[in-house]
Structures are given as structure tokens and as C-alpha cells.
Image (cartoon, coloured by chain):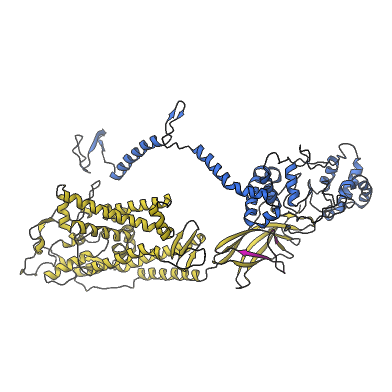
Chain colours: A yellow, B blue
Amino acid sequence: MNQKTTLIDRRNADHASISIDVEAVNSKAARELYKKRTPIYPKISGGPFRTLKWGAMVVLLAIYYLTPWIRWDRNEGAPDQAVLIDFEGRRFYFFFLELWPQEIYYITGLLILAAVGIFLSSALFGRVWCGYACPQTVWTDLYIHVERWIEGDRIARMRLDKAPLSLDKARKKISKHALWITIAALTGGAWVFYFGDAPTLMREIFTGQASLAVYLFIGILTFTTYALAGTMREQVCTYLCPWPRIQAAMTDRHALSVTYKVARGEPRGAHKKGDSWDDRGDCIDCRQCVAVCPQGIDIRDGDQLECINCALCIDACDAVMEKVDRPKGLIAYDSYENVARAVRGEAPVYTFLRPRTVLYASVLVIVGAIMLYALVNRTTLSLDAMRDRSPPFVRLSDGGIRNGYMIRVINKEPRVRTLELRVAGLRDAQISAMALPSTIDGGLIVTARADNVTSMRIYVASDAANERSNPITFVLTERSTGKTAERRAIFMAGTP
Amino acid sequence: MTTPDKNGVDDFTGTSTTGDEWDGIRELDTPLPRWWLYLFYACIAVAMVYWVLMPAWPTPNGYTPGILGFSDRANVAADIKSLQAARRPSFERLNAASYDEIVADPQLAEFARAAGETTFGDNCRTCHGAGGAGAPGYPNLADDVWIWGGTLKEIEHTLRVGIRSTHEDTRMSVMPAYGRDGLMSAKDIGDVTEYVLTLSTARDREKPQATAAARGAAIFQQQCVACHGASGAGDRSLGAPSLTDDVWLYGGSREEVRKQIELGRGGVMPMWETRLDPAMIRALAIYVYGLGGGEAEVAEPVSPTATDASPPATRAPATP
């Protein structure tokens, strides 16, 4: 099952005298159950996709590490961190937004948008998320780069691993792992800044004053970063991640993805300079596409769940095609439909408007519109009314009936608000509370705390309640802005 | 992971076998997944460490305490102690402040209310019901009708000394059992019942008999006015309830009113002075006061002879 190919790379002067095993060690055929991980030594490649990956890495890492340090001026008493998940205060701050726990549906909507966004991008361009933006990809890429910086490129790393232990080998290995752990610790360290004031937390972490939970989470994320990006790498995509499996259901034959053009490449074989290109494919079987692959597969085997569509093989193949003076794009973004068409000798077709993409785009637009509408019409004033369950009602000495309620005024604005509480729907209803002033017309004056919930016990009395259960409405009014909030409730009555 | 195996290798899967065979079926010796095996070893190692650090093994005299000295019982005791220490300043403030000061300080008032609610649940709820809803024979504490007074000071006093309790200054009122003790004939009791119903707003419901009520009025003037007053408005200084409203301790039907005149029932509330500390009694008073029936402090003391004093005719709980 395990076919090894040993060949001499004749076209690369650096490698001219070195016999190397370029083997797709992580392809389905090469993997055995219970086998220890076979290390992959991805070679550096250069080209537009490598540049794109560098760019994506820099931008994404910058977003991750720098976001907690962005300051955002809010009112007195509120944190000045732009993005903050405040578990203690039970708030989520995102620039101009401040969400309460009961508004978790905004996060749900965001997750739906993210999921549908990935579906759409997959249906159009294959696994661009896997190849460029997934944290696993970004950090693995960073770790491979560190490894390459300390131990050298592919051949040097393979030699180093085969070499017996020496002082130089130990130095390289130790410095690599030390650097990896440092990056991992920084990753875990940056994570906790999203949950507390970054400058304060930074000081606390270094002076040993931060809470155990902070150190614990830094520890956990340091370990997972080091393990996942340093030692597990492609195994995460191959064994742990559900996305490669889900992906199959989200794309179709027309989705662009990194493909080897079989019709043009085959039959493959070594090619000497000056030989004819007639009656043979363009693939010279140099296996550079395998050498640069961080996933340890051979793209020429076709669609594989191990492939993250990072397109580094495109860069590698294009460089070789340039050297042998053949057109670029033997490996390129293309659809399986076109690969099949090329085999049949038909012209390629590109259809981006397909039922699938239209559906994903519509869902994206609809969910986005609903989210936007909900966000724009988000209420910052609401109230709850909980009627006392025991006693359900009280008969008064003058024959009237009184009910007790717990009123919770929810004020999501960062300012103290003076409000008026009234009750409607019941004739002769009198509203009162133990320590609240009244308005002239019998309402209660309520002072709602800034960005908080204010609870108060209030009483409603009436001798006009004819039913056992009488619907009433509490109305909260802010006189200065004219904003109102209503809450329906029940007024209970009965005979002694 | 293929290891040379003396028991042979299964042809189909290529996996070594255990050597056991039943009717030609051989058992595969499939290796455990690496991660599982290592996790298992790690668990064993953690267990060993745990035995040393934490209480683990039973001994004839108890158990091995472990070098960390962990004890759930001690932790709970420490938690309670620290909680008590944390609450002590608030209770001290509660004890020192006047009721006006407590009500004016929302934080302290809420602390008192919360402490009172818990204590009410532990001690008072059995008789008075959740939220002071009351039950026949156990007064409702959420309405605006009080037998002994509904100001904070009166509530506190009632809590301290109890009603018909063993305290020497206890609230004491005894209604004679006119029927059981033969102080009144059955016919007279019936007549008084009719009269009492005419005094009360229950008259619309019970429709008392006019002639019997007229006879009962005369008996009422002899027997009942001393405590309940000429108009039946009651007297809080004596613990005599008002008969003019439609709120009844033992029920407002004709039968229940008659039964009360016959038996002269009166419940007992224990004194809490000996069971709860003064700060907690004040917290309890604030909680009960806040149930809805609390009355404002009256500027001038009510004259003990003012038998016609009617209870405050407001539906709203008072703001002290």
C-alpha cells in the first residue's frame, strides 16, 4: 500500500546531488490505523498565493493580538475597551454596541452569518476558509515558518531529524520549541485580554496578581496552541475537524478549488531538456507540489478531505512550469466539472450563479437584514412585572383588592433615567410603592439606574376588579424623550 | 502497529490475534488508540498524586487526611464564618440606626428586607404563609388590617414579646368563650352574630336578619363594646379587632362568626426576643412592614380610650 518514490530532482541545482523521498505521507493511502504521525517537512514556496497567505497571516494575527488594546471612550463607569466580554458585569462591549446577556440572539445571528458566509465562500471558491483564515492554518503556518527559520528548509530539516543528537541539533530543537511555547503563551495571553481590561490585566499577570482563572486559561491556550500548531498540525484537519466532512455537502461540481488538470498533466513522467513534449503530459513528476504541501498529500490524487486548498502547490507548480517553459496553471483554481470536461475535450464553463450560491447569498442577505433591523430598532428601555404569588391578592379594610408586583426596569442606556410608571386597563386602579414619590396624576416616579436593572416592589389597588383575572398594562414613560415601554400583567381578585 | 505475534495474524485484517478461538472464530488483538492509552496512564498517575494530597483511604479510625489537609466540612464552617463576618457591619448598622434612617438608606433597607425574608421563611412562614398570606386563625400580614398595630415600632414590639406567649409583657387579649362557657344562650349568640354582621361590610353578602340583629344590638352593648367599641371599630391597644371591615381572622361567614363568639378563639405567637437577636428582629419587622400593610408612624399617640378610632382609610402602604 505504501509506495515510496525516490527520485533525483534534476532541475534544481541545490538538490542535484541529494536523493530525497518526496512522499505524500498524509494521503489516505499512506495512512495506517494506529500509526505514529509521519512528520511533514513542507518546503518554502514563492508566488502570489504564498504572498496572499503571508498577508492573511499578518492581518489576522494583528487583529487577534491588537484588538483588545483598542480603546473606546464610553461614559463614566463603563470600560473603555472597544471589544470586551465582561463576564463579571454580564456585558458584551463591541465598539458602539453594548449587549446584555438576554440579547445573546445577536451572537446567534452573527454565528449564523459566519456559517452561511463559509457555505457561500465554499460554494464559490472551495475551502478558502481552511486555506487562509482558519486559526489552525494561520498558527500552523507561523509555526512552520519558525521551524524553517531555525532549522532550515525541507532538506535541512529532514537531515537534522535523521542526524544523531549533537550540540547543534539540541540547540536548534530547544530554541525552536522555546520559540513555539513563547508564541503559544502570547496567544493564550492575548485571549484573556478579551475578557478583562487589557492594560490592567497585563500588569496583574506580570505581578502575579491576576486570578487563578486567568493563569489557567493562559495555560490551557498555551498548551492547545503548542500542541495543535506545533505537534498535531495536519492531524487536526484530518482527524479532528468536522469541516472537511461538512464541506462535501456544501459544494458542488462547479465550485472552484485547487485542482490538478489531469487532461493536461497526464501521462506524467520525467522530462529532459530538449526532449519533445509530444505524446505526453505537462507533469514532469518533479513532486514539488508534494514537497511544499503542509498537509502531506499529493494534489494529483484529486479531491481529498486532507486538502485545505492553501494553493501553495499552485505556486510550486507554476515555478516549475516556468522553468521548463510550459504554460502555468497545471495546478490551478478550477472546478471538477471543468477537469472532467477537459478530459472529454470540451471547453470549460464557469457558472457562479447556481441555485446553491443564490440560496446561500439570499440567506446571508436575509439574516443580515434581520440583524440590522433588530439592531437599529433595539430597545434600551423595557420592564418586567412579576405578580406576587403569595398572597395572590389582599382584601383591604375598605373592601378594595390589592395586588403586589415586583417591577424590574431595564435601562440599557449609560445614564440615569427618570421615568413615570402607570397602570392602564383597570378602572380606579391606584399604584403605590413604599418609597417612591408620586406624580400629580397618580403615577410613580421611578429612577432607573444607568446601564442596569432597577427592581422595586409596587402595589396596585382597585375596587373595580370584577373578574378573578383582570388584564392590566404597566406603562413606563420617559417624559424627556417620550419613549415608552409596556408590559402586560394580570390583576387578581376574588371573594374572601 | 504490527508486532510479531506468536499467536498468529488474522489474514483478512492483518491484525494480530489473542490466540483465543471459539468455533473457528479468533479474537483480534486490536491495539488501544494511543491517545486513549496515554490518557489512561495519566489518570493512574493523577490518582497516585491524589492519594497523597487529598483524603483518600479509609482507616479503622477515620481516613487518611492527605497532606493538603482538605476538608469540605471545615470549608463550609469557614465559609459561614466569613459570611457572618462580612455581614456583621450591616447588622451593627441595622441595630444602631433608627427606622427612619434605615428606610432612607436604600442599601441598608434592602439588606434588612433580604435578611428579614430569609428569617421569615425559617420561622414565620409555617403559620403566616409565604408572603404573609395568612390562614384562618393566622393573620394576613400583607393587608392593611392590624390587630396590634402596623407601624414598624408596633411590629417590632409584637415580634419581641409575642402574643399570648410566656413573655411577661406579652400582647394579651382574651375573648370570652360565650358559648362553651355558658355565658350566653345559643339564641343570644345567634342574635349577636346577626348584629355583628350588620356592622361589617359583609352585610351585603350575608344579609343579616333585622329583628334578630336589633335584639343582638342590646346584648352587644352589654358584652362586646368594652373591647370592640360601640361601633365595632375595635381597639388596638387591647388587641380587639375591628368588626366593621370584611377582613376576618377566623372567617367571615355567618357560621364562622357565630363559632368565634361561642369559642372566643385566640392564637399564640411565640416571643422572638429569646430566639433572634435584636438586629434580626428589626430586619424581620422591616420585611413584614414591606409586605404591603405597613403603617406610618402616627405623630400623636392614640388615646387608649378612643374606642371609635377607625383604622387609616388608605389603600396604599404608608411611606414613613
If the image is split into quadrants, where does the N terminus of chain B sit? Answer: top left
Residue located at (70% from left, 65% from top): A438
Among the 4 quarters of the image, the one containing residue A420: bottom right
Residue A381 in the image, given as x and y percentages of width and height:
57, 66
Q: Nearer the viewer, residue B73 or B36?
A: B73
If the image is split into quadrants, where does the C terminus of chain B sit? Answer: bottom right
Q: Nearer the viewer, residue B23 or B2?
A: B2
Among the 4 quarters of the image, the one containing residue A233: bottom left
The magenta span reads A432-450
Q: Where is B56 relative to A25, above or below? A: above
Q: Position of A277 compared to A365: left or right? A: left
Q: Where is B65 relative to B96, above or below? A: above
Residue B208 in the image, given as x and y percentages of width and height:
88, 52
Q: Position of A38 compared to A119: left or right? A: left
Taking the magenta stretch, the answer to whether it contains residue A438 is yes
Which secondary structure is most common in the magenta stretch? Answer: loop
Taking the magenta stretch, the answer to whether it contains residue B276 is no
Residue located at (34% from left, 63% from top): A250
Residue B113 in the image, given as x and y percentages of width and height:
65, 51
Q: Is residue A196 visible?
A: yes
Q: Position of A307 compared to A90: left or right? A: left
Q: Nearer the viewer, residue A232 or B74?
A: B74
